[in-house]
Image (cartoon, rainbow, N blue to C red):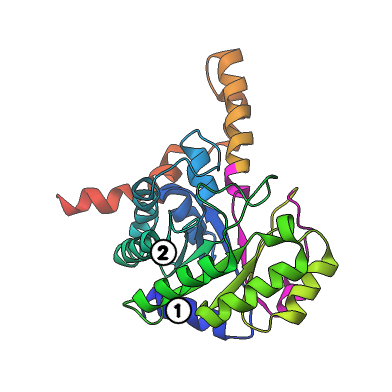
Amino acid sequence: MRSTTRLRQMIESDGIHVAPGAFDGLTARLVEESGSELLYASGGAIARSCGVPDIGLLSLTEVAARIEQMVDVTRLPVIADADTGFGNAVNAVRTLALFERIGAAGMHIEDQTFPKRCGHLDDKSLVSTDEMVQKIQAVSRARTDPDFVLIARTDAIATEGLDAAIERSNAYVEAGADVIFVEAPETVEQIEQIAERIPQPKLINMFHSGKTPLVPKERLRELGYRLIIVPSDLQRAVITAVRRTLEAINRDGDSGAVRDELASFAERERIVRTTDYLAIGS
């Protein structure tokens, strides 16, 4: 079954599905190995893995190259972070074509101005509802695979308030979005209101220490959320582990003090399937 069809079946079910955020081929393999059924290619995590902040500094080709690495090494459906579509409606259609070609199962585009900011940063600005509607309509019409899932994200809570975010969301559904992603609700009450006032499938962003409170998965399912993304927690775990290992290396000249926290040489090679590749040439 195509990954697009698998993702579409998820959003049309009454279950809820968690997509941990990966940022390269190795983390994509680890997400699959963990038993996850879905993967989120986090634009913010991809940017930070390049040593830059999530403020729209990477180009479409840079982001697409990283997403292609992830798609190539996992069988999981991959939700791609398309930021604003990397420009206007024409740019968004090109983004769609590229993401379809590399094998993403779906993507989300947002209504921030270009270049965008991380959804949990302040001082964001939005395009008009009409402009975003035109972008969604163009992308929806341009899909070559009808099962490719189009997710519309609005950042309006921070700039225009909850009512405006819901109004925008309903307009985006009318324009052809399959799933609505209201970014950064700040209270449980807002999460519940979004669920009540937007009956279509919804995605929610859940990560520790963001603006959105953590809500149990089962409660989100009851409210009608179908997808949970956890964009950068794997990357934050990596940062902590690398710092701890570097502390030992800089102090002792080797990593022996933290050896119990390290994957073994053999384990590392198993994850990237070294023997499979070597067998091809034997």
Residue identified by numbered label 2: 89
Q: Residue at x 42, y 70 (%)?
A: 105
In screen coordinates, is 83 left or right of 252?
left
Give the numbered dot on residue 26.
none
Rendered residue at 79%/75% (across/down): 193
Q: Which residue is disc 1 drawn over?
A: 6
Residue 157 is left or right of residue 131, and the answer is: right
The answer to which image quadrant residue 171 occupies is bottom right
**In the image, 175: left or right of 197?**
left
Q: Foreground residue, 196 or 124?
A: 124
Report x, y in % for residue 152: 55, 69
Q: Quadrant of the N terminus?
A: bottom left
Q: Is there CB contact under 8 Å for labels 2 and 1?
A: no
C-alpha gap between disc 2 and disc 1: 27 Å
Label 2 Cα neighbours within 10 Å, binned few <14 / some 14-19 / many ≥20: many
Residue 40 shows in this picture = yes
Mark 2 vs mark 1, foreground winner is 2
Q: The residue tagged with tag 1: helix, strand or loop?
A: helix
Q: Amino acid at mark 1?
A: Arg
Verify whether residue 20 appears in magenta. no
Residue 51 in the image: above or below residue 6: above
Residue at 34% across / 79% down in the picture? 145
* In the image, residue 82 above or below residue 115: below
Name which residue type carries label 2: Ala
* Residue sitting at x 57%, y 23%: 246
Segment colored magenta: 210-235
